[in-house]
Image (tube, rainbow, N blue to C red):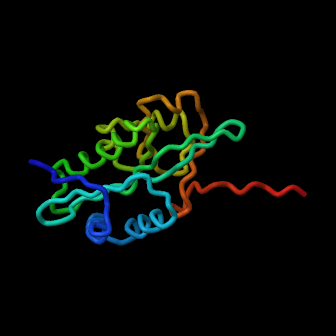
Amino acid sequence: MPVGDIVEVSDETISGADDVMKAAFGHMVEAQLTHDLRDGAYMLDERVVLQARGVVGYGALSRAIIRYGDNKEVAIAALAPLAVSPSVQREGIGFALAQTLISAWQENGNGAVIVLGHPPFYRRLGFSASLAERHLISPFPEAGDAFMLSDPAGVLCEITGGHVEFPAPFGVGVPRQKEKSA
């Protein structure tokens, strides 16, 4: 079954994307997060899936940073949120949407992507909890195997103990303040 047309978010599709997130998650927290990320210019890519009935899927990549060593950093992407209308879940829409976002990011010479999500689903997209554990310190210690990394180009291969910093709207892993000298 075809998933529909995967297109970039536009002013005309934002409301439909919000509706999908509310239906998929049962609240508007993720929709508000996307608005805050968009307003703060943290979005790297946003796509929706369009079918005859309208928007049925939404996915986004936002900026994140890995800090490591002596003030070194590397830019990565965070895949969040990814939502599909409950009435069309398990039809391959989320997989196709995530694959499109990740491929576009990595084919443009960019690197790693992190996600916090359902391990069986995201492993099919090349994400690995053990890879994340090898290179990163999770800002979600209670997440266990749900915190995963995809890094097919090996951008993070020399990094261990990298600290993940998300944009402020995520409310976790935000940039540390530099201590003031006395």
Q: How many marks?
A: 0
Instruction: Tell me: 17 left or right of 3.
Output: right
Query: What residue is drawn where x is 31% and y is 64%?
Result: 10
Pick whichever, 143 or 166, lies toward us.
Answer: 166
Instruction: Tell me: 140 left or right of 67.
Output: left
Pick whichever, 49 or 127, lies toward us.
Answer: 49
Image location of residue 51, percent across then percent down: 14, 60
Query: What residue is drawn where x is 75% and y is 54%?
Result: 178
Q: Is residue 175 visible?
A: yes
Query: What residue is drawn where x is 54% and y is 62%?
Result: 171
Query: What residue is drawn where x is 67% and y is 54%?
Result: 176
Q: Residue furthest right?
A: 182
Image location of residue 139, percent across then percent down: 55, 50
Q: Is residue 82 visible?
A: no
Q: Quadrant of the C terminus?
A: bottom right
Image location of residue 119, percent across then percent down: 35, 43
Q: Quadrant of residue 35?
A: bottom left
Is residue 157 depicted above or below 145 in this figure? above
Q: Quadrant of residue 68?
A: top right
Is residue 19 depicted above or below 141 in this figure? below
Instruction: Tell me: 105 left or right of 54.
Output: right
Instruction: Tell me: 114 left or right of 99.
Output: right
Image location of residue 133, percent across then percent down: 51, 37
Q: Residue furthest left?
A: 1
